[in-house]
Amino acid sequence: MGVCGYLFLPWKCLVVVSLRLLFLVPTGVPVRSGDATFPKAMDNVTVRQGESATLRCTIDNRVTRVAWLNRSTILYAGNDKWCLDPRVVLLSNTQTQYSIEIQNVDVYDEGPYTCSVQTDNHPKTSRVHLIVQVSPKIVEISSDISINEGNNVSLTCIATGRPEPTVTWRHISPKAVGFVSEDEYLEIQGITREQSGDYECSASNDVAAPVVRRVKVTVNYPPYISEAKGTGVPVGQTGTLQCEASAVPSAEFQWYKDDKRLVEGKKGVKVENRPFLSKLIFLNVSEHDYGNYTCVASNKLGHTNASITLFELSEPTSSTLLQEVKTTALTPGKGPGAISEVSNGTSRRAGCVWLLPLLVLVLHLLLKF
Ligand SMILES: *[C@@H]1O[C@H](CO)[C@@H](O)[C@H](O)[C@H]1NC(C)=O
Ligand SMILES: *[C@@H]1O[C@H](CO)[C@@H](O)[C@H](O)[C@H]1NC(C)=O
Ligand SMILES: *[C@@H]1O[C@H](CO)[C@@H](O)[C@H](O)[C@H]1NC(C)=O
Ligand SMILES: *[C@@H]1O[C@H](CO)[C@@H](O)[C@H](O)[C@H]1NC(C)=O
Ligand SMILES: *[C@@H]1O[C@H](CO)[C@@H](O)[C@H](O)[C@H]1NC(C)=O
Ligand SMILES: *[C@@H]1O[C@H](CO)[C@@H](O)[C@H](O)[C@H]1NC(C)=O
Ligand SMILES: *[C@@H]1O[C@H](CO)[C@@H](O)[C@H](O)[C@H]1NC(C)=O
């Protein structure tokens, strides 16, 4: 704050000072703003917080007294500093120019400054407005949130700056959706899993680059089995049943055969679990392994299941290639195939396309008899 010098000056000094002040700012004469003729102060001065502001006043040699005032407080009168604020310094006091500098400007320095001169015993003033700009800053933002699908979500982003920054919200990942709100508040009613991801709050004014902050919104939902793939395997080979489920938090998997839970570690059977996938692997398939299996996926919000069949391949000499082709051929509708088949495995068969017509024909014949 500008603590002004005259408060601390000795009494004698104060009298002199007051007299001088009378010359410069006569009581009853209001400070006129924007005196078009003389003295000539500059246009309004705009600076950023922390920078220095130069206040210039153009004068001529008829001028006998000069001063710069902050509102009604004298900062400098001639070469004398009246103000204790160390940020205020005299830049020049010549026959043509009287300038001061305010260093490390802050928002409270904003306001009218007056250049006051005395010419031929007439006081004149000229006013300049110091305008202080402040970069945008996000002062309050919602924390990351984890919420169940269907609930209402409300995010807040409060920013400061001069001029007042514009605040927007965007949904940026996993897919860049774009603007979802043009102000500080983002309200989502009945949030869906597609609306999960990162939201970015941006605060901008013309002073500096926009500032951005991110909030992660996690939408929880019960498991949904997207792929449950059956497979045909001849006796003595390795067979794998696969169950894929999306869920947040990620699903836990369990396998059943005819209502009996398969415990991991059973001889010849291995379970491989990953966050979105479970594999039931038969290392050496035997007759009694064939049948219907149930994959159960669960998280704290619920559970679901899918039935998957491990079936016998009648062609004992079959290779994995044949196995795949047969699985595919059997998939549409009938046959003991998978309940849901999402992947069509095009890429894996790509190299053997020429074999297909022949094999399908052979299989067709085999199935008929
Ligand atoms: C100008 O006056 C205001 C209000 O009294 C004060 O807060 C500010 O510190 C002053 N600035 C300077 C540079 O004197
Ligand atoms: C200077 O700033 C003041 C206050 O913001 C405003 O009223 C005035 O019009 C401005 N003058 C110029 C020349 O921009
Ligand atoms: C979500 O907001 C709407 C509208 O304000 C309200 O009717 C509904 O009950 C809210 N839902 C929940 C789960 O709070
Ligand atoms: C698979 O099991 C059969 C019968 O139990 C056995 O004869 C065969 O050696 C096993 N094969 C392998 C690779 O372990
Ligand atoms: C296996 O499941 C399918 C589909 O649910 C059903 O049609 C078939 O009869 C079941 N097979 C056995 C052996 O349980
Ligand atoms: C699979 O889901 C059905 C229908 O929700 C349910 O009746 C059945 O008990 C479930 N099976 C298992 C093994 O959880
Ligand atoms: C399945 O095949 C179709 C047509 O060949 C292709 O456009 C699609 O991308 C494939 N889907 C998958 C999951 O491989």
Image: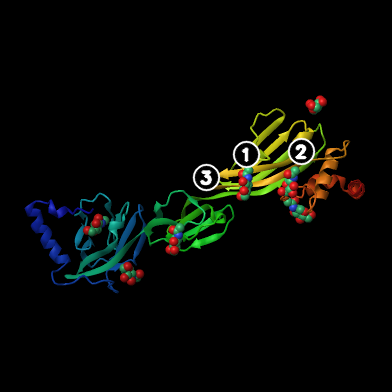
- In this view, 194 is above or below 294: below
Question: Which label belongs to residue 254?
Answer: 1
Asked if residue 173 lies left or right of residue 316, the reply is: left
Q: Which residue is mark 3?
A: 300
Q: Are marks 1 and 2 in contact (CB under 8 Å)?
A: no
Q: Amino acid at mark 2?
A: Tyr
**For marks 3 and 2 on the same chain, the one whose residue lies earlier in the sequence:** 2
Q: Is residue 71 left or right of residue 351?
A: left
How far across and down, in percent of the image, does residue 202 sit? 47, 56
Q: Nearer the viewer, residue 211 or 201?
A: 201
Report crowding for label 3: few under 14, some 14 to 19, many 20 or more residues within 10 A (C-alpha): some
Judged from the image, the secondary structure of the residue bearing numbered disc 1 is strand
Q: Looking at the picture, tell me which residue is in the foreground, 120 or 272.
A: 272
Q: CA distance from mark 3 to mark 1?
A: 15 Å
Q: Answer yes or no: disc 2 within 8 Å of ligand 5.
A: no
Where does residue 94 sit, x and y in percent of width and height? 28, 59
* Whether residue 250 is visible: no
The answer to whether residue 220 is above or below residue 120 is above
Disc number at residue 290? Answer: 2
**Marks 3/2: CA distance?**
32 Å
Residue 118, compared with residue 301, is above or below; it is below
Pinpoint residue 223: horizontal percent, then vertical percent: 59, 48
Residue at 71% of width from left, 44% of height from top?
A: 308
Q: How many marks?
A: 3
What kind of element bears circle 3? loop
Q: Amino acid at mark 1?
A: Gln
Which residue is painted at 13% across and 69% down in the image? 27
Residue 41 has which mark?
Answer: none
